[in-house]
Image (tube, coloured by chain):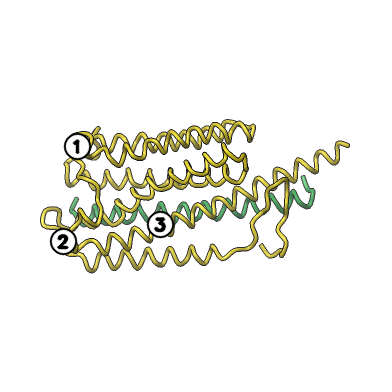
């Protein structure tokens, strides 16, 4: 592997983790919001 | 959320619609600009060549890994003192983000170690102490998943959070306290001026991202807890 491949891999891993975590957060917020709306309406 | 008055359950107030998503986009764009700037303006290192550019992601990730557990410590201690649920939730949000950055730091370190040291991993003091920090943070999250009682979970989490934070200065000083193959701490004073601007820009970009991630995770946790309180109140009302 060349140096460029290691550098590219490092930046790629960084973006995969950042975007992956941002998407995980987005899903968590949506799920929590739905849960809250259901529970404040008194649904089960 | 579009409601003007946020739902209240127990002593938890679910967050209103906020400007945090805009801050999130700013952080992402700032990170892209910082990375491009750093890559374009920094010359190849005399010894490492282009491998030096890994510094712009590895070092800021490592700094956030040490900063986030301090947030866990502050809010964990505050929970033990004031017993406010919000402090526990904020500490937990910071712990999750710290675990993510710790994992990223370890993987980036391995990618850098292979071409420079010839191995993916070695039981060096810096690497080992960082791995211990990652495991403590992962343990913190596992503990929260295992304990149902919210008060007991918050207390134990605060204790584990303190343990994790105690490890932070050990990670930081490990390169001076023990003989290691890891270089000494990267800071503007230890880095060639040609690389300082890139490092500073990326450090701020990671800081903005970390703040955004913690805040949004905290918002999700607040809504989840408010929902739990509301469900419990409804169940109690029906039981009467």
Q: How far is the residue under mark 3 from the one under mark 1?
A: 28 Å
Outermost residue toward the front in this view = B81
Which secondary structure, mark 1? loop
Give the quadrant of the N terminus of chain B: bottom right
Q: Position of residue B116 (x, y in %)?
A: 17, 46
**Mark 3–mark 1 contact, CB under 8 Å?**
no
* Side of B84 relative to B170 (left or right): right
Q: Which chain is green?
A: A
Give the quadrant of the C terminus of chain B: top right
Front in this rendered view, residue B188 or B41: B188
Within 10 angstroms of label 2, few (less than 14), some, or many (20 or more) residues? some
Outermost residue toward the right in this view = B240
Q: How far is the residue under mark 2 from the one under mark 3?
A: 26 Å
Mark 3 vs mark 1: tell me if same chain: yes
* Side of B49 relative to B146 (left or right): left
Which secondary structure, mark 3? helix
Which secondary structure, mark 2? loop
Q: Nearer the viewer, mark 1 or mark 2?
A: 1
Point 63% across, 35% down: residue: B150
Determine which residue is flagged by label 3. B207
Disc 3 is attached to a residue of which chain? B
Q: Position of residue B153 (x, y in %)?
A: 58, 33
Mark 2 vs mark 3: tell me if same chain: yes
N-term mark: 1 or 2: 2
Determine which residue is flagged by label 2. B44
Q: Quadrant of residue B15?
A: bottom right
Q: Position of residue B122 (x, y in %)?
A: 23, 35
Determine which residue is flagged by label 1. B180
């Amino acid at each position: 592997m060349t140096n460029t491949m290691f550098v590219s891999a490092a930046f790629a891993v960084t973006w995969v983790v950042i975007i992956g975590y941002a998407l995980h957060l987005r899903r968590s917020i949506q799920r929590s919001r739905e849960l809250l709306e259901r529970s404040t309406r008194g649904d089960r | 959320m579009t409601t003007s008055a946020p739902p209240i359950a127990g002593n938890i107030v679910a967050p209103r619609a906020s400007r945090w998503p805009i801050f999130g986009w700013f952080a992402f764009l700032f990170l892209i600009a910082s990375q491009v700037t750093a890559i374009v303006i920094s010359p190849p290192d005399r010894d490492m060549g282009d491998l030096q550019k890994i510094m712009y992601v590895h070092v800021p990730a490592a700094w956030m890994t040490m900063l986030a557990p301090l947030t866990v410590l502050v809010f964990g201690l505050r929970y033990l003192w004031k017993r406010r649920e919000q402090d526990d939730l904020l500490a937990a949000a910071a712990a999750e983000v710290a675990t993510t950055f710790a994992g990223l730091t370890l993987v980036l370190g391995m990618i850098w170690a292979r071409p420079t040291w010839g191995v993916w991993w070695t039981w060096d003091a810096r690497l080992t102490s960082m791995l211990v920090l990652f495991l403590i943070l992962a343990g913190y999250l596992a503990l929260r998943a295992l304990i149902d009682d919210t008060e007991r979970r918050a207390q134990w989490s605060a204790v584990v959070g303190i343990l994790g934070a105690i490890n932070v200065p050990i990670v930081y000083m490990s390169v001076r306290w023990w003989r290691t193959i890891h270089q000494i701490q990267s800071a503007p004073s230890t880095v060639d001026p040609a690389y300082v601007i890139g490092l500073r820009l990326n450090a701020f970009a990671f800081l903005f991202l970390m703040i955004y991630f913690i805040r949004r995770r905290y918002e999700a946790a607040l809504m989840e807890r408010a929902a739990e309180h509301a469900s419990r109140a409804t169940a109690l009302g029906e039981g009467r």
